[in-house]
Amino acid sequence: SLARGLYLAIPSFHTYSVGDVVVYQPPQEIAVLAEERGYISQPDMPFLKKVGAIAADHYEIKPDLSFWVSSHYIGQVITQDEEGRRMPYKIGQFFVPYGYLLPISPHPRSLDGRYYGSIPLSDVRAKVIPIFTID
């Protein structure tokens, strides 16, 4: 979902800001879905995404399927993947609870928080800093 390249991982990082890049274990049901559909090769494979929102921030999926974080347009929600399988999502406005963050990606087909919401900080393995990337 993010550019390929070389990243420096900082494990056990406890403070995250919007725009940080993190490696995390997705929710179990999403990991299973991603493996079953061939998005990842094994269910314990971590995801790499940007932090789109932190505790007390809000995000919204509008009826037109536009995805907004703190009143900033991020992209569209897709209803089906490239194989025609239904994607999980909920229309509405949501808040990130304390101890959670919302992972997002600029890639239009990314399996990110627009499909499964916020994740607990305890699922984050590391903050990463891009050293060299190829777009």
Image: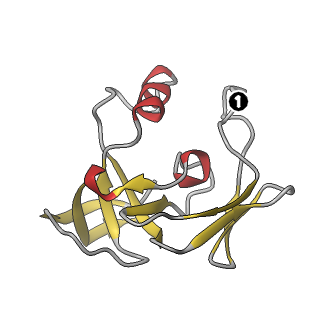
Taking the view exactly as shown, the residue that stands out farthest to the front is: 98
Residue placed under numbered mark 1 in the picture: 86
Q: Against 102, is 45 above or below?
A: above
Which is nearer the eye, 74 or 89? 89
Which is nearer the eye, 30 or 109? 30
Question: Relative to residue 126, is residue 77 drawn left or right?
Answer: right
Taking the view exactly as shown, the residue that stands out farthest to the left is: 11
Question: Relative to residue 55, is residue 66 drawn left or right?
Answer: right
Quarter of image, res 69:
bottom right
Q: Position of residue 21 (x, y in %)?
A: 34, 67
Q: Amino acid at mark 1?
A: Arg
Q: Position of residue 2 (x, y in %)?
A: 42, 59
Which is nearer the eye, 128 or 17? 17
* Residue occupying the point 31% across, 44% down: 25
* Residue occupying the point 52% across, 24% down: 37
* Colour mode of the rendering: secondary structure
Quarter of image, res 17:
bottom left
Q: Against 9, is 80 above or below?
A: above
